[in-house]
Image: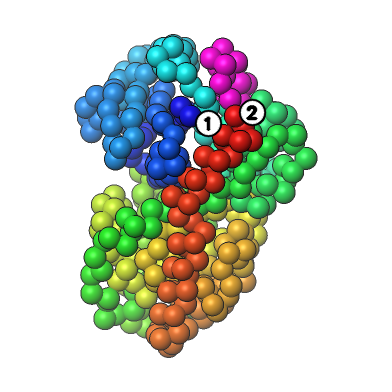
Amino acid sequence: MNIVYVGLSGFPFGYAAISRQKLICQGLQRAGASVSIVCSRAVFRDSRMKSRLGEFEGLSYRYVVNPKRSDSFIIRNLLRLSEPWRELICLYKMNRQKKISHLLVSHNNEMMKSIWYFLVSKLIRSKVVFSLVELYEPGYAKSFTAKLNHFFFLRVGLRFYDAFLPISGFIADFFKDVPRPSLLVPIMVDFERVSSVSSSAESIVPRFVFCGAAGYPNTIQFCIQSFELMKHPRAELYIVAGGSDSEVNWVKDLIHQSPKSDRIKHSMNLSEEDLFKLYKSSSALLIPLFNTVKDRARFPHKLGEYLATGRPVISTDGGEIAGYLENGKQGLFAESGNVNQFASCMDYVIENPKEAERIGLEGQIICKSQFSHINLGLLLYDFLKNRCG
Protein backbone atom coordinates (compact mmCIF):
# COMPACT_ATOMS: atom_id res chain seq x y z
CA MET A 1 0.00 0.00 0.00
CA ASN A 2 1.10 3.52 -0.79
CA ILE A 3 -0.60 5.95 1.60
CA VAL A 4 -0.49 9.75 1.53
CA TYR A 5 -1.65 11.74 4.56
CA VAL A 6 -3.19 15.14 3.71
CA GLY A 7 -5.25 17.88 5.34
CA LEU A 8 -2.86 19.07 8.05
CA SER A 9 0.02 21.51 7.88
CA GLY A 10 2.78 21.98 10.41
CA PHE A 11 4.49 18.60 10.27
CA PRO A 12 6.66 17.68 12.10
CA PHE A 13 5.99 20.38 14.72
CA GLY A 14 2.73 20.97 16.50
CA TYR A 15 0.31 19.79 19.12
CA ALA A 16 -2.00 16.78 19.29
CA ALA A 17 -3.14 16.67 15.65
CA ILE A 18 0.40 16.57 14.26
CA SER A 19 1.54 14.11 16.93
CA ARG A 20 -1.34 11.78 16.04
CA GLN A 21 -0.57 12.15 12.33
CA LYS A 22 3.04 11.19 12.96
CA LEU A 23 2.15 8.16 15.10
CA ILE A 24 -0.44 6.88 12.60
CA CYS A 25 2.09 7.15 9.78
CA GLN A 26 4.87 5.50 11.77
CA GLY A 27 2.54 2.70 12.84
CA LEU A 28 1.47 2.07 9.23
CA GLN A 29 5.08 2.20 8.10
CA ARG A 30 6.09 -0.37 10.73
CA ALA A 31 3.25 -2.57 9.44
CA GLY A 32 4.68 -2.49 5.92
CA ALA A 33 2.99 0.43 4.16
CA SER A 34 4.72 3.17 2.20
CA VAL A 35 3.65 6.49 3.77
CA SER A 36 4.14 10.14 2.79
CA ILE A 37 2.82 13.38 4.25
CA VAL A 38 1.73 16.33 2.09
CA CYS A 39 1.21 19.75 3.67
CA SER A 40 -0.59 22.42 1.65
CA ARG A 41 -0.21 25.55 3.79
CA ALA A 42 2.65 27.76 4.92
CA VAL A 43 2.35 27.96 8.71
CA PHE A 44 5.77 28.74 10.15
CA ARG A 45 6.66 32.29 11.14
CA ASP A 46 10.34 31.37 11.41
CA SER A 47 12.76 29.44 9.22
CA ARG A 48 12.80 26.17 11.18
CA MET A 49 11.81 24.31 8.00
CA LYS A 50 14.72 24.68 5.59
CA SER A 51 13.24 22.73 2.71
CA ARG A 52 9.88 21.92 1.17
CA LEU A 53 10.92 18.28 0.86
CA GLY A 54 12.50 16.15 3.52
CA GLU A 55 12.38 13.28 5.95
CA PHE A 56 11.72 13.35 9.68
CA GLU A 57 12.01 10.29 11.91
CA GLY A 58 11.74 8.05 8.87
CA LEU A 59 8.67 9.80 7.39
CA SER A 60 8.85 11.56 4.02
CA TYR A 61 7.07 14.90 3.81
CA ARG A 62 6.62 17.67 1.30
CA TYR A 63 5.11 21.16 1.38
CA VAL A 64 3.45 22.36 -1.81
CA VAL A 65 4.47 25.93 -0.93
CA ASN A 66 7.34 27.46 1.01
CA PRO A 67 6.71 26.35 4.64
CA LYS A 68 7.63 29.82 5.93
CA ARG A 69 4.60 32.07 6.20
CA SER A 70 4.90 35.29 4.20
CA ASP A 71 4.84 38.59 6.06
CA SER A 72 2.74 40.09 3.25
CA PHE A 73 -1.03 39.92 3.73
CA ILE A 74 -1.58 40.01 -0.05
CA ILE A 75 0.89 37.20 -0.78
CA ARG A 76 -0.55 35.05 2.02
CA ASN A 77 -4.05 35.31 0.60
CA LEU A 78 -2.92 34.72 -2.96
CA LEU A 79 -1.12 31.59 -1.81
CA ARG A 80 -4.20 30.48 0.11
CA LEU A 81 -6.21 30.57 -3.10
CA SER A 82 -3.60 28.53 -4.96
CA GLU A 83 -2.84 25.98 -2.21
CA PRO A 84 -5.59 23.45 -3.07
CA TRP A 85 -4.57 23.43 -6.73
CA ARG A 86 -0.90 23.09 -5.86
CA GLU A 87 -1.78 20.19 -3.59
CA LEU A 88 -3.79 18.57 -6.38
CA ILE A 89 -0.91 18.89 -8.84
CA CYS A 90 1.48 17.46 -6.24
CA LEU A 91 -0.77 14.45 -5.58
CA TYR A 92 -1.31 13.91 -9.29
CA LYS A 93 2.45 13.81 -9.90
CA MET A 94 3.03 11.52 -6.91
CA ASN A 95 0.33 9.20 -8.20
CA ARG A 96 2.00 9.09 -11.63
CA GLN A 97 5.29 8.09 -10.02
CA LYS A 98 3.79 5.50 -7.68
CA LYS A 99 0.12 4.62 -7.46
CA ILE A 100 -1.51 6.09 -4.32
CA SER A 101 -3.75 3.46 -2.78
CA HIS A 102 -5.23 5.60 0.01
CA LEU A 103 -5.53 9.23 0.96
CA LEU A 104 -5.71 9.66 4.74
CA VAL A 105 -7.41 12.95 5.57
CA SER A 106 -7.61 15.10 8.70
CA HIS A 107 -9.40 18.42 9.16
CA ASN A 108 -11.87 20.13 11.48
CA ASN A 109 -15.01 18.44 10.13
CA GLU A 110 -15.16 20.82 7.15
CA MET A 111 -17.80 20.06 4.54
CA MET A 112 -16.04 21.76 1.62
CA LYS A 113 -12.79 19.92 2.34
CA SER A 114 -14.71 16.64 2.44
CA ILE A 115 -16.09 17.35 -1.03
CA TRP A 116 -12.66 18.50 -2.26
CA TYR A 117 -10.81 15.37 -1.16
CA PHE A 118 -13.62 13.21 -2.55
CA LEU A 119 -13.04 14.83 -5.96
CA VAL A 120 -9.26 14.51 -5.64
CA SER A 121 -9.59 10.81 -4.80
CA LYS A 122 -11.74 10.24 -7.88
CA LEU A 123 -9.21 12.00 -10.08
CA ILE A 124 -6.28 9.91 -8.89
CA ARG A 125 -8.45 6.82 -8.37
CA SER A 126 -7.55 6.15 -4.77
CA LYS A 127 -9.54 5.40 -1.66
CA VAL A 128 -10.10 8.30 0.74
CA VAL A 129 -10.30 7.76 4.51
CA PHE A 130 -11.13 10.37 7.16
CA SER A 131 -9.57 10.50 10.63
CA LEU A 132 -12.43 11.76 12.82
CA VAL A 133 -11.25 13.08 16.18
CA GLU A 134 -13.83 15.65 17.29
CA LEU A 135 -17.54 16.25 17.50
CA TYR A 136 -18.84 19.69 18.35
CA GLU A 137 -21.77 20.95 20.39
CA PRO A 138 -24.90 21.74 18.33
CA GLY A 139 -24.67 25.39 19.40
CA TYR A 140 -20.91 25.82 19.04
CA ALA A 141 -21.17 27.43 15.61
CA LYS A 142 -21.66 31.19 15.78
CA SER A 143 -21.57 32.42 12.18
CA PHE A 144 -24.07 31.41 9.53
CA THR A 145 -21.42 29.63 7.44
CA ALA A 146 -20.20 27.66 10.47
CA LYS A 147 -23.77 26.60 11.28
CA LEU A 148 -24.30 25.58 7.67
CA ASN A 149 -21.07 23.55 7.69
CA HIS A 150 -22.02 21.86 10.97
CA PHE A 151 -25.51 21.01 9.67
CA PHE A 152 -24.33 19.39 6.45
CA PHE A 153 -21.23 17.63 7.81
CA LEU A 154 -23.20 15.80 10.50
CA ARG A 155 -25.70 14.60 7.90
CA VAL A 156 -23.72 13.84 4.78
CA GLY A 157 -20.05 14.70 5.39
CA LEU A 158 -18.82 11.16 5.95
CA ARG A 159 -20.55 9.89 2.82
CA PHE A 160 -17.81 11.56 0.77
CA TYR A 161 -15.26 9.10 2.22
CA ASP A 162 -14.72 5.42 1.57
CA ALA A 163 -14.14 4.81 5.29
CA PHE A 164 -13.61 6.73 8.51
CA LEU A 165 -11.57 6.31 11.69
CA PRO A 166 -13.36 7.54 14.84
CA ILE A 167 -11.09 8.21 17.80
CA SER A 168 -13.74 7.35 20.41
CA GLY A 169 -16.68 5.08 21.01
CA PHE A 170 -18.90 8.14 21.38
CA ILE A 171 -18.11 9.27 17.82
CA ALA A 172 -18.42 5.71 16.50
CA ASP A 173 -21.90 5.39 18.06
CA PHE A 174 -22.96 8.83 16.81
CA PHE A 175 -22.16 7.89 13.20
CA LYS A 176 -23.07 4.19 13.44
CA ASP A 177 -25.75 4.51 10.73
CA VAL A 178 -23.35 5.95 8.14
CA PRO A 179 -23.01 3.23 5.47
CA ARG A 180 -19.22 3.27 5.43
CA PRO A 181 -16.71 0.88 7.03
CA SER A 182 -15.06 2.29 10.13
CA LEU A 183 -12.33 1.38 12.57
CA LEU A 184 -12.06 2.86 16.05
CA VAL A 185 -8.48 4.12 16.37
CA PRO A 186 -7.99 5.51 19.89
CA ILE A 187 -5.13 7.67 21.10
CA MET A 188 -1.69 6.45 20.11
CA VAL A 189 1.60 6.59 21.96
CA ASP A 190 5.15 5.60 21.14
CA PHE A 191 5.60 3.64 24.35
CA GLU A 192 9.26 2.87 23.72
CA ARG A 193 10.04 6.55 23.09
CA VAL A 194 8.50 7.68 26.38
CA SER A 195 10.10 4.82 28.31
CA SER A 196 13.55 5.61 26.90
CA VAL A 197 13.65 9.02 28.60
CA SER A 198 15.41 8.62 31.92
CA SER A 199 13.50 9.72 34.98
CA SER A 200 14.71 12.75 36.85
CA ALA A 201 14.53 12.51 40.62
CA GLU A 202 10.96 12.66 41.87
CA SER A 203 10.20 16.04 43.37
CA ILE A 204 10.46 16.24 47.17
CA VAL A 205 7.55 18.67 47.10
CA PRO A 206 4.31 17.08 45.80
CA ARG A 207 4.01 18.19 42.17
CA PHE A 208 0.96 17.99 39.93
CA VAL A 209 1.26 18.56 36.18
CA PHE A 210 -1.27 19.58 33.56
CA CYS A 211 -0.19 19.73 29.93
CA GLY A 212 -2.49 20.96 27.19
CA ALA A 213 -3.32 23.79 24.86
CA ALA A 214 -3.92 27.24 26.31
CA GLY A 215 -7.02 27.25 24.12
CA TYR A 216 -8.81 25.11 26.73
CA PRO A 217 -9.36 27.82 29.37
CA ASN A 218 -12.10 25.98 31.28
CA THR A 219 -9.84 22.97 31.75
CA ILE A 220 -6.93 25.05 33.04
CA GLN A 221 -9.21 27.03 35.33
CA PHE A 222 -10.63 23.78 36.71
CA CYS A 223 -7.12 22.51 37.53
CA ILE A 224 -6.25 25.75 39.32
CA GLN A 225 -9.49 25.81 41.31
CA SER A 226 -8.99 22.18 42.36
CA PHE A 227 -5.40 22.93 43.37
CA GLU A 228 -6.60 25.84 45.51
CA LEU A 229 -8.92 23.47 47.42
CA MET A 230 -6.23 20.94 48.33
CA LYS A 231 -5.53 20.32 52.00
CA HIS A 232 -1.77 20.07 51.52
CA PRO A 233 -0.24 23.55 51.42
CA ARG A 234 3.20 22.52 50.13
CA ALA A 235 2.01 21.05 46.83
CA GLU A 236 2.91 22.65 43.50
CA LEU A 237 0.99 22.86 40.23
CA TYR A 238 2.82 22.94 36.90
CA ILE A 239 0.83 24.12 33.88
CA VAL A 240 2.44 23.44 30.52
CA ALA A 241 0.31 25.31 28.01
CA GLY A 242 1.14 27.08 24.77
CA GLY A 243 -0.99 28.83 22.21
CA SER A 244 -1.64 32.27 20.78
CA ASP A 245 -0.39 35.34 22.65
CA SER A 246 -3.89 36.15 23.91
CA GLU A 247 -4.47 32.58 25.12
CA VAL A 248 -1.13 32.40 26.94
CA ASN A 249 -1.69 35.83 28.53
CA TRP A 250 -5.07 34.65 29.76
CA VAL A 251 -3.41 31.64 31.45
CA LYS A 252 -0.81 33.89 33.06
CA ASP A 253 -3.53 36.25 34.34
CA LEU A 254 -5.47 33.32 35.76
CA ILE A 255 -2.39 32.13 37.65
CA HIS A 256 -1.64 35.65 38.90
CA GLN A 257 -5.17 35.96 40.31
CA SER A 258 -4.93 32.70 42.26
CA PRO A 259 -4.33 32.91 46.03
CA LYS A 260 -1.78 30.13 45.50
CA SER A 261 -0.05 31.84 42.58
CA ASP A 262 3.36 31.46 44.24
CA ARG A 263 2.99 27.66 44.00
CA ILE A 264 1.76 27.56 40.40
CA LYS A 265 4.30 27.52 37.59
CA HIS A 266 3.65 28.02 33.89
CA SER A 267 5.87 26.91 31.03
CA MET A 268 5.59 26.27 27.31
CA ASN A 269 7.62 25.04 24.35
CA LEU A 270 9.41 22.39 26.39
CA SER A 271 11.44 19.85 24.47
CA GLU A 272 9.90 16.39 24.32
CA GLU A 273 12.61 15.03 26.62
CA ASP A 274 12.11 17.78 29.22
CA LEU A 275 8.36 17.29 29.09
CA PHE A 276 8.60 13.55 29.68
CA LYS A 277 11.04 14.14 32.54
CA LEU A 278 8.57 16.58 34.09
CA TYR A 279 5.81 13.98 33.81
CA LYS A 280 7.98 11.32 35.44
CA SER A 281 8.95 13.59 38.34
CA SER A 282 5.31 14.40 39.16
CA SER A 283 3.11 13.05 41.92
CA ALA A 284 0.23 12.78 39.44
CA LEU A 285 -0.81 14.03 36.02
CA LEU A 286 -4.06 15.93 35.53
CA ILE A 287 -6.53 15.69 32.64
CA PRO A 288 -10.06 16.81 33.62
CA LEU A 289 -12.90 16.56 31.10
CA PHE A 290 -16.43 17.96 31.19
CA ASN A 291 -19.86 16.54 30.50
CA THR A 292 -20.13 18.12 27.06
CA VAL A 293 -20.49 16.60 23.61
CA LYS A 294 -17.02 17.82 22.68
CA ASP A 295 -15.30 16.31 25.73
CA ARG A 296 -17.27 13.04 25.61
CA ALA A 297 -16.32 12.65 21.96
CA ARG A 298 -12.66 13.58 22.06
CA PHE A 299 -9.82 11.43 23.40
CA PRO A 300 -6.95 13.65 24.61
CA HIS A 301 -3.62 12.72 23.01
CA LYS A 302 -1.74 13.61 26.22
CA LEU A 303 -3.40 10.76 28.09
CA GLY A 304 -1.27 8.25 26.18
CA GLU A 305 1.94 10.04 27.14
CA TYR A 306 0.74 10.41 30.72
CA LEU A 307 0.01 6.70 31.12
CA ALA A 308 3.23 5.62 29.42
CA THR A 309 5.28 7.34 32.15
CA GLY A 310 3.82 5.11 34.87
CA ARG A 311 2.66 8.06 36.96
CA PRO A 312 -0.94 8.09 38.27
CA VAL A 313 -3.50 9.97 36.20
CA ILE A 314 -6.33 12.01 37.71
CA SER A 315 -9.32 12.70 35.48
CA THR A 316 -13.11 12.91 35.57
CA ASP A 317 -15.74 10.25 34.92
CA GLY A 318 -16.96 11.66 31.60
CA GLY A 319 -15.53 10.92 28.21
CA GLU A 320 -13.65 8.05 26.63
CA ILE A 321 -11.03 7.71 29.37
CA ALA A 322 -13.39 5.99 31.80
CA GLY A 323 -13.97 3.23 29.23
CA TYR A 324 -10.33 2.14 29.50
CA LEU A 325 -9.38 2.92 33.09
CA GLU A 326 -11.18 1.86 36.26
CA ASN A 327 -11.36 4.29 39.16
CA GLY A 328 -8.93 3.31 41.89
CA LYS A 329 -7.25 0.63 39.75
CA GLN A 330 -5.61 2.29 36.72
CA GLY A 331 -6.56 5.90 37.43
CA LEU A 332 -8.36 8.23 39.81
CA PHE A 333 -11.65 9.83 38.76
CA ALA A 334 -13.74 12.66 40.14
CA GLU A 335 -17.26 13.52 39.12
CA SER A 336 -17.21 15.70 36.03
CA GLY A 337 -17.10 19.38 36.98
CA ASN A 338 -16.63 18.69 40.71
CA VAL A 339 -13.53 20.60 41.85
CA ASN A 340 -13.87 19.35 45.43
CA GLN A 341 -13.69 15.70 44.38
CA PHE A 342 -10.82 16.46 42.01
CA ALA A 343 -8.92 18.14 44.85
CA SER A 344 -9.61 15.10 47.05
CA CYS A 345 -8.03 12.86 44.39
CA MET A 346 -4.94 15.06 44.42
CA ASP A 347 -4.78 14.86 48.23
CA TYR A 348 -5.24 11.07 48.03
CA VAL A 349 -2.09 10.73 45.92
CA ILE A 350 -0.04 12.57 48.56
CA GLU A 351 -1.54 10.65 51.47
CA ASN A 352 -1.27 7.22 49.82
CA PRO A 353 2.03 7.16 47.88
CA LYS A 354 2.29 3.36 47.57
CA GLU A 355 -1.25 3.06 46.28
CA ALA A 356 -0.64 5.94 43.88
CA GLU A 357 2.46 4.17 42.59
CA ARG A 358 0.47 0.99 41.99
CA ILE A 359 -2.26 2.88 40.13
CA GLY A 360 0.34 4.51 37.90
CA LEU A 361 1.96 1.19 37.01
CA GLU A 362 -1.42 -0.44 36.30
CA GLY A 363 -2.26 2.46 34.00
CA GLN A 364 1.04 1.95 32.21
CA ILE A 365 0.10 -1.67 31.49
CA ILE A 366 -3.20 -0.55 29.94
CA CYS A 367 -1.33 2.00 27.84
CA LYS A 368 1.08 -0.56 26.44
CA SER A 369 -1.68 -3.03 25.55
CA GLN A 370 -4.31 -0.59 24.22
CA PHE A 371 -2.54 2.48 22.81
CA SER A 372 0.74 1.29 21.28
CA HIS A 373 1.15 2.91 17.86
CA ILE A 374 2.79 -0.29 16.63
CA ASN A 375 -0.19 -2.51 17.53
CA LEU A 376 -2.73 0.02 16.29
CA GLY A 377 -0.72 0.51 13.10
CA LEU A 378 -1.07 -3.21 12.37
CA LEU A 379 -4.84 -3.06 12.93
CA LEU A 380 -5.17 -0.02 10.69
CA TYR A 381 -3.02 -1.58 7.97
CA ASP A 382 -5.24 -4.68 7.98
CA PHE A 383 -8.39 -2.52 7.89
CA LEU A 384 -7.20 -0.44 4.93
CA LYS A 385 -6.05 -3.52 3.02
CA ASN A 386 -9.03 -5.79 3.62
CA ARG A 387 -12.01 -3.49 4.21
CA CYS A 388 -11.00 -0.42 2.28
CA GLY A 389 -8.78 -1.81 -0.42
At 38% across and 53% down in the image, what residue appears?
190
Q: Quadrant of residue 76?
A: top left
Query: Which image quarter holds the C terminus?
Result: top right
Instruction: Based on the picture, tell me whether residue 153 belongs to the magenta stretch.
Output: no
Relative image position of residue 265 (x, y in whole percent) = 31, 65
User: Crowdedness of circle 2 by 10 Å Cα count: few (<14), some, many (20+)?
Assistant: many
Q: Amino acid at mark 2?
A: Tyr
Q: Amino acid at mark 1?
A: Val
Labelled disc at residue 161: 2
What residue span does the magenta drawing correspond to? 110-127
Q: Looking at this view, is 183 or 49 the one in front? A: 183
Magenta span: predominant SS is helix
Q: Is residue 199 above or below residue 157?
A: below
Label 1, on which residue? 105
Relative image position of residue 348 (x, y in whole percent) = 47, 83
By what rule are the colours in the image chosen? rainbow
Q: Quadrant of residue 336?
A: bottom right
Q: Is residue 170 above or below residue 117?
A: below
- Earlier-in-chain disc, 1 versus 2: 1
Element at label 1 = strand
Whether residue 76 sits left or right of residue 314 in the image: it is left
Q: Are marks 1 and 2 in contact (CB under 8 Å)?
A: yes
Q: Is residue 172 visible?
A: yes
At 55% across and 41% down in the image, what residue appears?
382
At 56% across and 44% down in the image, what residue appears?
133
Whether residue 173 sits left or right of residue 338 in the image: it is right
Q: Looking at this view, is 172 or 209 the one in front? A: 172
